[in-house]
Amino acid sequence: MRLLLIGPPGAGKGTQAEILSRILGVPHISTGDLFRDQVGRRTPLGREAARFLDAGELVPDRVTTDMVRHRLGEPDAERGFLLDGYPRTVPQAQALSSVLAAGGTTLDAVLELTAPEDVLVDRLLARGRPDDTEDLVRHRRRIHHRRTVPVLGHYAGLVRTVEAVGTVEDITARILTALGLPESVSTR
Ligand code: ADP
């Protein structure tokens, strides 16, 4: 299964992606995690990305797409993947279409997670990552609306929208239903 997860900061994409990756048996690929790993290891890519992460800005499309193309070329992504946090701009979505077309594959679904603003802000402030300060969260939310919401238009027929409010288990169940998967797969 080839899935995208799209949602504003705090929607719980990472939490649900971890669970879904176990259920579906495909790798969870988070561009945010990949960047934070590069930053932590002080690689050249990490040093370049750090400026953007610290400012709550998007890392430039070309850098991000090169990283994703490389990751999707790893053997574990051959049978499917759960892409969390990419594409975040329309040019990234176009680039992903080319990457997939080159490999002769297509996406199965695009999962959109939504939640009211107060829930999102509370979750982020509780998480407390360095880029979760009030100012940076506001900025990242603005970028999400301006640059990422238009990405959904690129995937018109594939989008399944799920309200990400409630317990983690409830939300997972709702996602499985939205994807047309029996809920029992989660207890296997
Ligand atoms: P959140 O969804 O809470 O914003 P992520 O871990 O997905 O957190 O992303 C953290 C940061 O990583 C972003 O603010 C951005 O700087 C960078 N990033 C992640 N994915 C992308 C992407 N597809 N394009 C550009 N920058 C990205």
Image (tube, rainbow, N blue to C red):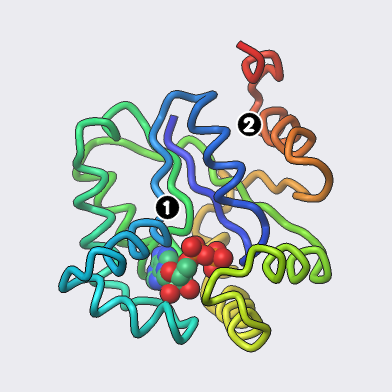
Q: Which residue is mark 1?
A: 30
Among the 4 quarters of the image, the one containing residue 126: bottom right
Q: Which residue is mark 2?
A: 179
Say whether mark 2 is within 8 Å of ligand 1.
no
Is residue 64 placed above or below 181 in the rendered structure? below
Q: Position of residue 169 (x, y in %)?
A: 75, 33
Mark 1 crowdedness (10 Å alpha carbons): few <14, some 14-19, many ≥20: many
Q: Position of residue 108 (x, y in %)?
A: 48, 35
Among the 4 quarters of the image, the one containing residue 37: bottom left
Q: Earlier in the sequence, mark 1 or mark 2?
A: 1
Q: Position of residue 69 (x, y in %)?
A: 23, 53
Q: Dot 2: what SS?
A: loop
Say whether mark 1 is within 8 Å of ligand 1.
yes
x 67%, y 52%: residue: 113
Q: Nearer the viewer, residue 180 or 7?
A: 7
Q: Which amino acid type is shown beneath numbered disc 2?
A: Leu
Is residue 59 placed above or below 81 in the rendered structure? below
Q: Which mark's residue is nearer the viewer, 1 or 2?
A: 1
